[in-house]
């Protein structure tokens, strides 16, 4: 049974409510009213207010025909993800809201702590940096069509960040946020409970590593990448505009 947060001393690790949905495999509730208020403000700012404003700018820009406003929204989303990632890596923790308005307030905010926060945070940072870079490129005069053509001509522009983010996110799944085991039997039960998340994480790690390896190959040795593509599919790289040879 969960122990109410108000009965815990600050810093006490509690079992909280049952393990939240994957990929998170453990955590604790705020240990005091002051910590709860701090977590509440930060979760709302990071995961609700900042993304909501960015989405509003993005949607408003599309609907009103103001592409620069839409690009600003993309940059805002990127900066939001980047901030989440940097804080997760620096503090080795992630904070999330769990449940809706019917969830008791004391159990609504979860703090996930441990080494898994580092790859999760890095995945957020990579995704945020990529989004922000795309928005900034548009604001500095690069058309979306030109970005698309650049990615098709040199696919490492997409493969490297996507592969890196998938690899890191999968690594977070594999590590997991595990609650402390009370006994040997409990340890075995925890391992079996989190096995699906770890298997899913391994799949993401393999996919991410493959995409990253292909991206690095195309980046560092484009002629080898194109020769391999031609040998496998029987056709040359269809989007090659000669950029690889420059």
Image: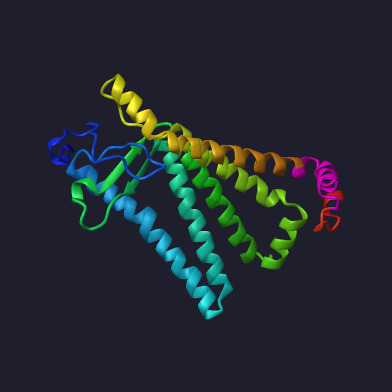
In-image side of 215 versus 46 (left or right): right
In-image side of 209 versus 110 (left or right): right
Q: Position of residue 236 (x, y in %)?
A: 86, 53
What type of secondary structure mainly makes up the magenta span? helix
What residue sits 26% from the left and 23% below the top? 182
Q: Position of residue 242 (x, y in %)?
A: 86, 55
What residue sits 44% from the left and 37% below the top? 196
The stretch of residues the image draws in magenta is 218-236
Is 4 magenta? The answer is no
Residue that protrudes farthest toward the top in the picture = 184
Asked if one can make out residue 173 in the rendered structure from this viewpoint, the answer is yes
Give the camera-side residue of 7 and 42: 7
Asked if one can make out residue 246 in the rendered structure from this viewpoint, the answer is no
Q: Quadrant of residue 135?
A: bottom right
Give the camera-side residue of 102 and 5: 102
Is 226 magenta? The answer is yes
């Amino acid at each position: 049974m969960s122990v109410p947060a108000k009965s815990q001393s600050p810093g006490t690790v509690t079992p909280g409510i049952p393990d939240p949905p994957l990929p998170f495999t453990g955590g604790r509730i705020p240990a005091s009213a002051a910590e709860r208020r701090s977590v509440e403000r930060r979760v709302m700012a990071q995961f609700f207010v900042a993304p909501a404003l960015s989405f509003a700018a993005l949607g408003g820009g599309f609907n009103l025909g103001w592409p620069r406003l839409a690009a600003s929204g993309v940059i805002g989303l990127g900066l939001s993800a980047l901030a989440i990632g940097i804080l997760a890596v620096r503090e080795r923790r992630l904070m999330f809201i769990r449940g809706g308005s019917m969830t008791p307030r004391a159990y609504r905010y979860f703090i996930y702590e441990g080494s898994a926060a580092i790859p999760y945070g890095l995945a957020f940072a990579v995704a945020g940096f990529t989004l922000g870079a795309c928005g900034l490129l548009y604001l500095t005069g690069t058309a979306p069509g030109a970005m698309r053509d650049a990615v098709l001509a040199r696919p490492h522009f997409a493969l490297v960040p996507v592969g890196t983010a998938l690899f890191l996110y999968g690594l977070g799944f594999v590590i997991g946020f595990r609650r402390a085991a009370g006994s040997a039997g409990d340890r075995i039960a925890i391992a079996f409970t989190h096995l699906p998340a770890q298997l899913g994480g391994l799949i993401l790690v393999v996919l991410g590593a493959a995409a990253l390896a292909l991206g690095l190959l195309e980046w560092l040795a484009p002629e080898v990448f194109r020769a391999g593509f031609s040998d496998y599919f029987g056709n040359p790289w269809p989007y090659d505009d000669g950029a690889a040879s420059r």
